[in-house]
Amino acid sequence: MAGGTDGVSSRESRKKARDWGALALLVKGWGRGLGFQAVGIADADLTAAEQGLLDWLGVGYHGEMEYMARHGVRRARPAALVPGTVRVISARLDYKPAAADGWAILDDRRSAFISRYATGRDYHKVLRNRLQSLATRIAGEVGDFGYRVFTDSAPVMEVELARRAGLGWRGKHTLLLDRRAGSYFFLGELYTDLPLPADVPATEHCGTCTKCIDACPTRAIVAPYELDARRCISYLTIELKGPIPEALRPLIGNRVYGCDDCQLACPWNRFAQVSSELDFGVREGLDRASLVSLCGWSESEFQERLAGSAIRRIGHERWLRNLAVGLGNAPSSPEVVAALRARANHPSALVREHVAWALAQHGARV
């Protein structure tokens, strides 16, 4: 846990004299001043969520995300991950960009659909820097204290913590929902040893709605609040390192990085506002680019154009794998076939296999 070297006894003496309720209000105000749309505080006891995590891992829904199983129950035990943790400060940062209509792009099979969270700058650095600034501001008020910043970078149950911090409720698609912002936002956490008063968890407002479940192209939402990641397009196009199962390729359509269908279908997202964050603005025309044009990027172009983007983490090889699937599902045209044939002799067997499949969908040979 980060902090200075004053020692435990010094920290404890300061804690006894502190008005923690007043500090909690200050923390939330500082967070909003840093650009977060909401800040809440959760206790660190996630015992009630632990069995659900173990059951999810037990049936193998995590697929090849071995780190999920490796960390196991540490996700549900904040103090085991960061000793001394008694509270978690959860923060929300809206990201919805002023992008082309998602459904329109999905309907145009010549275009590439990229999850809207990834059309701008990588959110990890943005959230991490702001959370660190919040921690620095707290330290300026209370002195040295124990903390650690997390931005989707460690075994953290961020949705459960945000729910307990009052930032929203878990939707049937497993994402956090807020009545004023839908689900187009990032979450970040500050694990701390400060005994701040915890907020009241938000109430649920999904009712009988199942639009997110009905909209899932691959039926990855196998039941309300239950996601089989092995069928999820976000998993298939981002986390999966090997071949995409052939039976699922036609269902992926033109989604080449992530999938927003469950969010696009959610009625609560009609309240989501376009983010004012310049970092989350659309870059490189990624909200409406054609599959053919993206497939033409060389590896150096991929690295240069996507510098600072979350997409860059999958590498050029998997980028071409995903584009090959998208082109295989695109309307047949000389341009589509030519784009695929240009990659038919790629050094990567993974790329070649997906290109061959895609060409076969158009009745073309390598």
Image: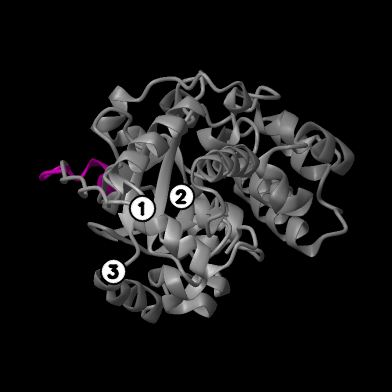
Identify residue for label 3. Answer: 49
Q: Is residue 18 above or below residue 275?
A: below
Residue 209 lies in magenta, yes or no?
A: yes
Looking at the rendered image, the quarter that the N terminus falls into is bottom right
Identify residue for label 1. Answer: 17
The residues tagged by marks 1 and 3 sit, at their Cα atoms, a distance apart of: 33 Å
The tag earlier along the polypeptide, 1 or 2, is 1
Element marked by disc 3: helix
Which label is found at residue 356?
none
Which residue type carries mark 2?
A: Leu
Along the line of sight, which residue is nearer the eye, 29 or 204?
29
Give the side of residue 114 with respect to residue 311, left or right: left
Residue 303 lies in magenta, yes or no?
A: no
Dot 2: within a 10 Å radius of its alpha carbon, few (fewer than 14), some, or many (20 or more) residues? some
Q: Give the range drawn in magenta.
A: 206-215
Residue 104 lies, in percent from the top left, at: 45, 23
Q: In this view, does 334 lie above or below 303?
A: above
Identify residue for label 2. Answer: 251
